[in-house]
Amino acid sequence: ASRFQKQCTAMRPNGSHRHIRSGVASMEMKRKGKMGPRMPGTGPSQSMLEQQRMYQQMMKEREESGVPTFELFVRGPNSPSWYPAGALGGDENSKELVESWMGGMMSDMAKGAIDRGVAQSLFSDKKSLDAKIIEQYPQLKKSKNNLRYGYKVAYKGLLEKRPNAKDVTELKEDMTEAPLDKVKSALGFGKK
């Protein structure tokens, strides 16, 4: 052992200390700065880990319940990555729509109805959602007026029937209208 090692306290990987003495004095070496529960940049905080655990548990319970879950995502206008933004729980009506999309004759109409339902739920309280997103993802603050939202459907057996369901479907505000309403708006009917 070197002379320096003999005069210092060595820290083992498991966190225990070993005092090595040589001569009159010994010295204990520790990390400089505050000893907190975690160092910034060394991983997720305990509260974030707890949120992730609770979210995974909720998703597992939703999958076992037999109704679909609509996982929401957000990104900035130039971002290639989607960030998780929460989830909407389905009901028996949404279950029927998803099953129709999985293999029914009217699968395109069912998908349109799903898009419309998720868009209506999301855009009805968009300002509040935007504020929560900015709080959760400060890196999106510069894009707060141009946030883009999308969703995926989580439902048992869906990916086997519809492999493209793994992709995020981007939502637009005009998706809140039914096809007939879009035609009426385009022709100028229904406006006051």
Image (cartoon, rainbow, N blue to C red):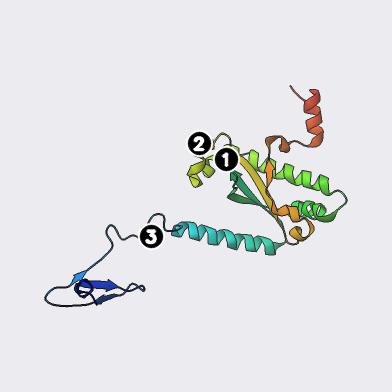
**Which numbered circle lies on residue 76?**
1
Front-lying residue, 92 or 135: 135
Task: Kindly indicate the quadrant of the structure image that contains residue 80.
Answer: top right
Task: Tell me residue 138's x, y (percent).
Answer: 48, 43
User: What secondary structure is marked by label 2?
Assistant: helix
Which residue is located at x 81 percent, y 30 percent?
183
Task: Tell me residue 67's x, y (percent).
Answer: 72, 58
Q: CA distance from mark 2 to mark 3?
A: 29 Å
Label 3, on which residue?
38
Label 2, on which residue?
142
User: What secondary structure is marked by label 1?
Assistant: loop
Asked if marks 2 and 1 touch (Cβ < 8 Å), the reply is yes
Q: In the rendered view of the protein, which quadrant contains the N terminus?
A: bottom left
Q: CA distance from mark 2 to mark 1?
A: 9 Å
Give, as a three-letter code, the residue at label 3. Answer: Arg
User: What secondary structure is marked by label 3?
Assistant: loop
Compared to residue 16, the image places residue 103 above or below, namely above
Q: Residues within 10 Å of mark 2 (few under 14, many from 20)?
A: few
Task: Kindly indicate the quadrant of the structure image that contains residue 2.
Answer: bottom left
Give, as a three-letter code, the residue at label 1. Answer: Gly
Which residue is located at x 13 percent, y 73 percent?
25
Task: Tell me residue 31's x, y (percent).
Answer: 28, 62
Q: In the rendered view of the protein, which quadrant contains the C terminus?
A: top right
Give, as a three-letter code, the residue at label 2. Answer: Lys
Taking the image as shown, residue 130 lies to the left or right of residue 65, namely left
Front-lying residue, 111 or 19: 19
N-terminal-most mark, 2 or 3? 3
Asked if marks 1 and 3 touch (Cβ < 8 Å), the reply is no
N-terminal-most mark, 2 or 1? 1
Task: Tell me residue 169's x, y (percent).
Answer: 70, 46
Compared to residue 67, the image places residue 143 above or below, namely above
Residue furthest toward the right? 105
